[in-house]
Image: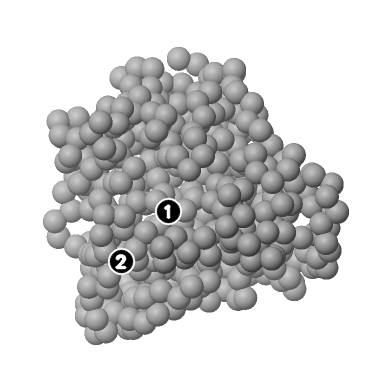
């Protein structure tokens, strides 16, 4: 089946400058082992993993060094062989501190015994596929890091008929997923077949924005004959086309209800990078110990898409890309719309580190927040049909009941409202704070 042209138009959205040309044509580069790896136990949505090693222990690549702390959690594995130097709480890219294990590599990069490939995965039971995904510590690599074994094991009464592979990569600057689709299309498709088998899904769609024609062509050319009802869907280029609920509507016309999950409309969405990791875990038996990250921005000497071990510090990534061209005014983990500003480059990469962005003074502007002017522009671009203007004022007044009534929990923090706001109000920060407080209030009830 060929590329699908007809798609459904999602509400809201914006068209920021994309700046993907900085790294889009840079093939994935393999980064050598750094002198130390700082491996966080909080690399996924849900409870952080529990450290299973202590200072002085020897570890091997692929060894479990963090065990899942419940169903919605994920295992963490040693990215290389070496010695545990430290187990201590360290800052994460999003701010909170979490336990992390610092490993001094021994340079041998020796895998743990017991890695069991399964090229004939078609003979596996669905439960065996889910178990191999869980054992591999796979979690979402394009968003919040939801544990993948949870996504691919819905309740027995829930029918999933459609699997969508998210290749939109709508965040400006980021090109890691684009390169994966160009360089690993066949493996991504096999990963999709594996996930579809686990879900009993009979329809597979790969959703890619139409500003990536090379990726569309590569993924279309690699569709396996056994895939059945499979196609590449060319989405209109618009941020945030990569958001899960928006993508489901654009591809299928189905609307996920407020407060609902994609499985309620029979759909599961997986990032293409996550799907590649599933392939590696199931077919090769290898847990997730590395990922591709886009290191880019006007302050980077050699913007690149770098395959680096989890736990590589941002400083080491920058050094591998030639360092900086001059003063750096802003460091962002992730993309400019949904990423987190960093004070320095001491934080380390995790399973969710899609990008590292360094911007110079010419690309960063300081504004003073002003009162809302009631222009309504934020309402017009909100892809969730919320009223950010009203919500922000409720939250400034600490009226969390009103904010909850106005569906603040449906906010996905995409940043469209702040991008459009002529008063330069910190709308996303208001939403994040408000959502956290609503969750806290719910737990107290």
Along the viewing direction, whichever of 198 and 182 lies nearer the viewer = 198
The image quarter containing residue 360 is bottom right
How many labels sit on residues? 2
The answer to which quarter of the image holds residue 260 is: top left
Is disc 2 placed on a helix, strand or loop? loop
The residue pinned by badge 2 equals 49
Up/down of 263 relative to 312, above or below: above
Residue under label 1, please give it: 145
Which quarter of the image is occupied by the N terminus?
A: top left
User: Element under label 1?
Assistant: loop
Question: What residue is rendered at 30% in x and 46% in y?
Answer: 150
Q: Residues within 10 Å of mark 1 (few under 14, many from 20)?
A: many
Q: Going 80% across and 65% down the picture, which residue do you hit?
A: 369
Sequence-earlier tag: 1 or 2: 2
**Visible residue check, residue 14:** no
Say whether residue 280 is left or right of residue 353: left
The image quarter containing residue 280 is: top left
Q: Position of residue 172 (x, y in %)?
A: 66, 48
Query: Quick check: can you spot residue 246?
Result: yes
């Amino acid at each position: 089946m060929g590329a699908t042209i007809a798609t459904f138009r999602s509400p809201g959205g914006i068209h920021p400058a994309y700046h993907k040309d900085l790294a889009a044509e840079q093939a994935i580069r393999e980064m050598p082992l750094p002198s130390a790896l700082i491996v966080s136990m909080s690399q996924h949505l849900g409870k952080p993993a529990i450290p299973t090693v202590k200072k002085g222990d020897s570890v091997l690549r692929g060894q479990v060094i963090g065990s899942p702390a419940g169903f919605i959690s994920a295992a963490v594995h040693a990215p290389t062989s070496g010695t545990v130097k430290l187990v201590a709480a360290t800052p994460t890219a999003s701010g909170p501190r979490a336990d992390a294990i610092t490993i001094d590599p021994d340079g041998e990069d020796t895998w743990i015994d017991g890695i069991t490939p399964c090229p004939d995965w078609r003979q596996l039971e669905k439960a065996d596929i889910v178990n191999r995904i869980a054992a591999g510590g796979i979690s979402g690599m394009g968003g919040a890091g939801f544990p993948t074994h949870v996504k691919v094991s819905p309740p027995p009464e829930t029918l999933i008929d459609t699997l969508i592979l998210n290749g939109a990569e709508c965040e400006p600057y980021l090109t890691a997923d684009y390169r994966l689709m160009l360089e690993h299309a066949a493996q991504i498709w096999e990963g999709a077949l594996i996930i579809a088998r686990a879900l009993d899904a009979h329809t597979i769609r790969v959703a890619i924005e139409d500003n990536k024609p090379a990726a569309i062509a590569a993924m279309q050319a690699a569709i396996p004959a056994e895939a059945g009802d499979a196609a590449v869907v060319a989405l209109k280029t618009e941020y945030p086309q990569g958001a899960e609920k928006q993508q489901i509507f654009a591809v299928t016309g189905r609307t996920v209800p407020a407060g609902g999950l994609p499985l309620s409309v029979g759909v599961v969405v997986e990032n293409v990078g996550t799907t590649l990791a599933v392939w590696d875990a199931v077919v090769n038996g290898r847990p997730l110990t590395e990922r591709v990250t886009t290191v880019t921005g006007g302050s980077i000497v050699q913007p690149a898409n770098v395959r680096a071990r989890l736990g590589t510090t941002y400083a080491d990534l920058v050094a591998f890309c030639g360092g900086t061209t001059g003063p750096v005014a802003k460091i962002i983990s992730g993309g400019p719309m949904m990423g987190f500003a960093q004070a320095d480059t001491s934080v380390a990469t995790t399973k969710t580190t899609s990008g590292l962005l360094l911007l110079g003074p010419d690309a960063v502007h300081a504004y003073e927040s002003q009162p809302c002017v009631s222009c309504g522009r934020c309402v017009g671009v909100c892809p969730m049909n919320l009223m950010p203007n009203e919500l922000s004022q409720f939250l400034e007044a600490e009226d969390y009941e009103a904010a909850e009534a106005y569906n603040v929990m449906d906010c996905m923090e995409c940043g469209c409202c702040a991008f459009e706001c002529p008063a330069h109000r910190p709308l996303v920060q208001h939403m994040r704070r408000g959502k956290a407080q609503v969750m806290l209030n719910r737990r107290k009830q």
